[in-house]
Image (cartoon, rainbow, N blue to C red):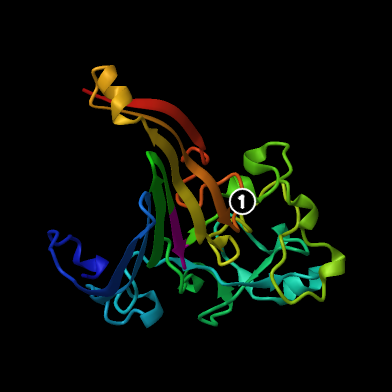
Amino acid sequence: TIAPWMGTDLPSVNIGKTKNHGLDLEAEWNGKIGKDFRYFAKFTFSTSENRIVFRDDPNKLDDYLKDAGKPIGYSSKYLATGNFTSIDDIFNYTQTAISATNQNRLVPGDLVYIDYNADGVIDDKDVVPVKNLNYPLTTYGLTLGFSWKGLSLNALFYAATGVYKADINTFLFDFPRGNIKAQPSTLDRWTAEDADVTEVVRPAVHLDNTYNEKASTYNYSDYSYLRLKNLELSYQLPKRWTKAMRMSGCQVYVNGNNLFTISGVDSRRDPENGSAGVYPIVKRYNIGVRLSF
């Protein structure tokens, strides 16, 4: 890092140090009941932690603005601590210098952001690292199945925990991009009856959500989920049948993908993906035949 008054840039250098550690666990059980019934269960668990040990941070930069000491890919947000309850609250609070906003554009019900560095102004120096990451550090997998006289069933469950993602503002706020559209949760917005509520409430309605849409802890949500990723039921025809048809094997199957997902996020979003451009969750059902000769 060099000061801007140097008038030049240094060439790119592969500099920095990180550390990673974690734990992977896999346990599998195979069993048999009687002559023909076989079953199995496989459980996987993975957890990890990483840290930026060194980056070329400016020496006099405040620690909370430096990369060193924080996880790889960490996010920085405004800290939303509540809602303004009156016009007096707005004008008696710290002045906002957030881009394209000012005190005159705020109304009761708008979010209150913490003046983290206590300099009397809400600006980009009040954007601070948050604990949660936008990728999962802990995941679980469970595969279950059985077979009995040619009939087989396999299921794969997958879960990710402790992952947070930024909400899509066009799904979160009313009148997105100037369109006359109310979100399904519009009736849950702040009203005067919520003046004594201590937690953060859905902000007041605006035609322009520039202020409330800022990346903050309000629109950064827990995207942990449990999903049935795959389920398949199949039947292997007996050898005497396939031999008569001059085949070495024939299996009839029906399967499905993404059959259900348990998550606390907006049902219009796939909790496994964070981008607004990602297609919503799609359930797939297939019926087919596998032939071998």
Q: Position of residue 251 (x, y in %)?
A: 35, 30
Image: magenta residue range:
157-163
Q: Residue at x 53, y 79 (%)?
A: 116
Q: Residue at x 45, y 28 (%)?
A: 287
Q: Answer whether residue 136 is visible to the viewer in this image.
A: no
Q: Residues within 10 Å of mark 1 (few under 14, many from 20)?
A: some
Q: Quadrant of the N terminus?
A: bottom left
| Occupied quadrant, residue 73 | bottom left
Residue type at mark 1 is Asp
Instruction: Tell me if residue 114 comes above or below residue 223 in the rendering.
Output: below
Of 12 and 22, nearer the camera is 22
Of 142 and 260, nearer the camera is 142
| Occupied quadrant, residue 50 | bottom left
**Which residue reaches farthest top?**
245
Q: Is residue 38 magenta?
A: no
Q: Main secondary structure of the magenta part?
A: strand
**Left or right: 115 in relation to 185:** left
Q: Is residue 161 magenta?
A: yes
Element on which disc 1 rests: loop
Q: Quadrant of the C terminus?
A: top left
**Left or right: 237 in relation to 264:** left
**Left or right: 193 in relation to 289:** right
Instruction: Tell me if residue 33 comes above or below residue 233 in the rendering.
Output: below
Q: Position of residue 277 (x, y in %)?
A: 47, 39
Q: Which residue is mark 1?
A: 266
